[in-house]
Image (spheres, coloured by chain):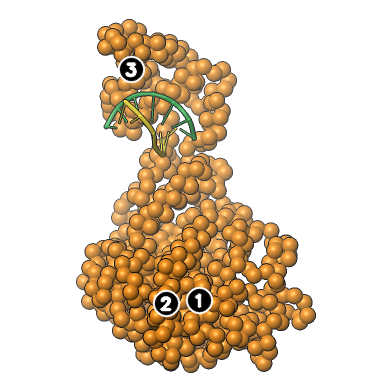
Chain colours: A orange, B green, C yellow
DNA sequence: TTTAGGG
DNA sequence: CCCTAAA
């Protein structure tokens, strides 16, 4: 029994990964998230950055995370440092930013980056455009931004035939403390546009860049404030391989969360799977232009590498809502001018639904698309070369990647520039450390890299409705540096990556590198070995889940520094503790404590743990009566087993004998005591 | 909040 | 040490 118990707790205490508990933690987090109203921070620019990093490789200056200017959010590749500088000085609190722009920048529920579309097999733009077009929230819509978009696009285009399909995620800010008003006619417009697109998708096959970026873009966007984002749940990187049969454009169903709506009249199911419209819906917060106040200026940015469950849940929810609102979609489509509609046509089309899975992957069978015959496949850079004709190929359009989670907490007194840098660093920390691509099939991760696609089930005739890709970090902690000008607390943590997607190699790397690759920029994180004695905390289950030994644990788990002023960045663990209590550190009872406990129990008996606590552990704040009860339980158990089986600090046999005696006595005494109203409670003394 | 027990 | 049903 003891052994069993020890195994359960682990020989090094309770820090060993309690799987069930970890699961609970995750659940709590989810719950918390949902309670929070799904509001998520959309960092368009952040996406851009990520996309830039991933798609365009290195060599380009990273875009800034611009939160000050809505018009620049579209600048996926191009940074707007100049503007940024202007606004950095002002603290959030006092900043008189352009609210519209501001909101727009943080509008999205999910940070969905419809960044460059990588065409893997062809240079046709159909898919790419679908992505871009279907996202009304895209910043590309405004005229002043077109320039920037153009440049970005050009940049991309020049390089490896990437297309910039900029899109924004849907807004999902509802009843959030951070929610600003998101409702606007422009949003409605966007919605309508999208809906219309669905209706006309069949007619559209190809679009040119100009259409996408400068023409029918929702001008509404320019004047429409959206919502304030509190967190970024995910970042999608859209890549598009182009193998779409003309006239039958694939429909990509998005799995973004849908905002809860209080009104349906204007709401359109943009994500309706049936229509195949994967557009990202701007959501309305509050009703009809009513702006909500922004009580909290605390930002949480999360790049969420979603769990499969979340993923699926999102999809389901989306479907549900879409069904629910389907009829409205039709109406909206009718009402909207074709000119604007056409913009979204590519992305919609129920007839293409089967071509794309809910993960945003478009699977097209080889050679089935006559429409693209006229466009010779242009091999993209790198390994995505064209396949030899004749063989069955699996063609994928990867609409998005799921990105690891980041959690950022920044004080409202922080400057905008600080926020930008923080987000940027968080992202770069993940990406900079090197990312892997994971493949999910039917929700399960395919770990065997040696399997052929055929063996795995990814064949050319597979509809790929369950194929997904993820970005996986190589580093486990996101090194976020504190803003120089702002020493206040920031929380940035990249967590649960290992827990959710624990590639063996990554885990290994983490162990090997330990502090080295994660600490340099983390003044606030103490990566020293974890010592239970002086810190009343323990690594979160998720953090521990992949750790096998105390040594590894100590190497991997950062502990917040004790000096408050030096603590700029703390692990999410600390943050999570506020969400759900953290497991206390194990504190083995000393012999003296056992002695006191035994004595108290002898006198008071079992079943009066509160009294025992008061009597013998009054000053031991970390010993609760539950602890004492538990300890007694284990003491009794220990006393009953052979000495060889006992572990930990040996308890004098004398004490154990007393334990058994007292336990036996009180076991008998207890029932009787009820009747006697406890006259002889101290018989043993 | 405490107890009592299972985890 | 955690979690909780019960009291």
Same chain for marks 1 and 3?
A: yes
Which residue carries the number 2 mark? Answer: A329
Q: Determine the residue positioned at 33% across, 17% down.
A: A600
The Cα atoms of the two marked residues, 1 and 2, are separated by: 9 Å
- Mark 1 vs 3, N-terminal side: 1
Q: Are marks 1 and 3 in contact (CB under 8 Å)?
A: no
Q: Residues within 10 Å of mark 1 (few under 14, many from 20)?
A: many
Is circle 1 on the same chain as circle 2? yes
Q: Which mark is residue A275?
A: 1
Q: Which mark is residue A38?
A: none
Pick whichever of labels 2 and 3 is earlier in the sequence: 2
- The residue sitting at 35% across, 56% down in the picture is A35
| Discs 1, 2 touching: Cβ within 8 Å | yes
Observer able to see residue A570: no
Q: Quadrant of residue A7?
A: top right
Other-residue count near label 3 (Cα within 10 Å), few / some / many at <14 / 14–19 / ≥20 = many
Instruction: Give the percent coordinates (x, y) of residue A573.
Output: 41, 51
The residue drawn where x is 67% and y is 84% is A369
What residue appears at the point 64 percent right and 70 percent down from the top-left corner? A463
Q: Is residue A226 above or below residue A546?
A: below
Q: Position of residue A453 (x, y in %)?
A: 71, 66
Q: CA distance from mark 2 to mark 3?
A: 72 Å
Q: Circle 3 is placed at which residue position?
A: A600
SS category of the residue bearing label 2: helix
Between A395 and A10, which is closer to the camera in this rendering?
A395
Say whether disc 1 or disc 2 marks the residue closer to the N-terminus.
1
Residue placed farthest to the right in the image?
A: A390
Measured as percent of width and height from the top left, residue A75 is found at 42, 83
Most foreground residue, A273 or A310: A273
Q: Nearer the viewer, mark 2 or mark 3?
A: 2
């Amino acid at each position: 029994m003891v052994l069993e118990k020890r195994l359960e707790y682990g020989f090094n205490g309770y820090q060993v990964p309690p799987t069930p508990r970890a699961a609970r933690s995750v659940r709590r987090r989810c719950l918390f998230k949902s309670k929070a109203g799904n509001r998520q921070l959309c960092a368009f620019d952040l996406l851009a950055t990520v996309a830039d990093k991933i798609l365009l490789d290195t060599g380009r200056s990273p875009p800034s995370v611009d939160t000050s200017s809505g018009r620049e959010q579209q600048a996926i590749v191009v940074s707007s440092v100049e503007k940024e500088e202007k606004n950095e000085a002002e603290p959030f609190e006092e900043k008189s930013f352009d609210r519209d722009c501001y909101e727009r920048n943080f509008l999205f529920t999910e940070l969905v980056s419809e960044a460059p579309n990588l065409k893997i097999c062809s240079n046709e733009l159909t898919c790419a455009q679908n992505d871009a077009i279907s996202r009304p929230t895209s910043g590309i819509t405004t005229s002043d931004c077109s320039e920037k978009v153009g440049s970005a696009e050009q940049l991309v285009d020049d390089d490896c035939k990437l297309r910039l399909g900029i899109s924004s995620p849907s807004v999902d800010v509802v009843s959030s403390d951070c929610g600003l008003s998101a409702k606007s006619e422009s949003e409605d417009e966007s919605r309508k546009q999208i809906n219309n697109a669905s209706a006309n998708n069949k007619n559209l096959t190809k679009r040119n860049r100009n259409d996408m970026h400068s023409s029918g873009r929702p001008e509404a966007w320019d004047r429409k404030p959206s919502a304030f984002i509190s967190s970024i749940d995910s970042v999608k990187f859209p890549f598009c391989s182009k193998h779409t049969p003309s006239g039958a454009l694939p429909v990509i169903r998005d799995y973004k969360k849908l905002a809860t709506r209080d009104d349906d009249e204007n709401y359109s199911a943009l994500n309706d799977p049936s229509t195949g419209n994967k557009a990202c819906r701007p959501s309305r917060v509050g009703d009809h232009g009513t702006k909500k106040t922004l009580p909290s200026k605390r930002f949480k940015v999360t790049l969420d590498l979603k769990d499969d469950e979340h993923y699926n849940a999102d999809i389901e929810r989306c479907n549900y809502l879409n069904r629910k609102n389907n009829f409205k979609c039709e109406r909206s489509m009718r009402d909207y001018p074709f000119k604007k509609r056409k913009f979204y046509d590519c992305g919609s089309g129920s007839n293409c639904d089967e071509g794309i899975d809910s993960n945003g992957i478009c699977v097209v069978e080889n050679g089935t698309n006559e429409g693209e015959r006229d466009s010779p496949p242009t091999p993209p850079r790198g390994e995505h070369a064209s396949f030899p004709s004749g063989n069955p190929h699996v063609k994928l359009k990867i609409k998005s990647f799921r990105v690891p989670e980041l959690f950022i907490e920044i004080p409202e007194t922080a400057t905008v520039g600080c926020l930008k840098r923080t987000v940027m660093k968080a992202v770069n920390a993940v990406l900079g450390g090197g990312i892997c691509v994971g493949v999910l099939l039917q929700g399960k991760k395919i770990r065997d890299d040696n399997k052929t696609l055929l063996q795995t089930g990814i064949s050319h005739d597979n509809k790929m409705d369950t194929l997904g890709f993820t970005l996986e970090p190589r580093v486990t902690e996101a090194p976020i540096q504190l803003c120089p000008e702002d020493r206040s607390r920031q929380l940035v943590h990249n967590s649960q990556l290992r827990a959710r997607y624990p590639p063996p190699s990554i885990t290994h790397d983490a162990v090997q590198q330990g502090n080295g690759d994660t600490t340099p920029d983390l003044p606030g994180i103490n990566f020293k070995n974890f010592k239970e004695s002086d810190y009343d905390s323990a690594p979160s289950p998720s953090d521990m889940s992949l750790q096998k030994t105390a040594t590894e644990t100590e190497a991997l788990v950062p502990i917040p520094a004790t000096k408050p002023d030096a603590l700029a960045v703390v692990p999410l663990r600390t943050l999570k503790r506020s969400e759900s209590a953290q497991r206390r550190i194990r504190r083995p009872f000393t012999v003296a404590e056992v002695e006191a406990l035994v004595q108290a129990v002898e006198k008071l008996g079992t079943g009066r743990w509160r009294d025992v606590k008061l009597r013998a552990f009054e000053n031991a704040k970390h010993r609760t009566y539950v602890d004492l009860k538990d300890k007694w339980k284990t003491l009794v158990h220990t006393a009953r087993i052979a000495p060889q089986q006992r572990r930990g600090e040996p308890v004098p046999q004398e004490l154990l004998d007393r334990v058994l005696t007292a336990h036996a006595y009180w076991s008998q005494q207890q029932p009787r005591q009820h009747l006697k109203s406890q006259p002889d409670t101290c018989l043993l003394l």
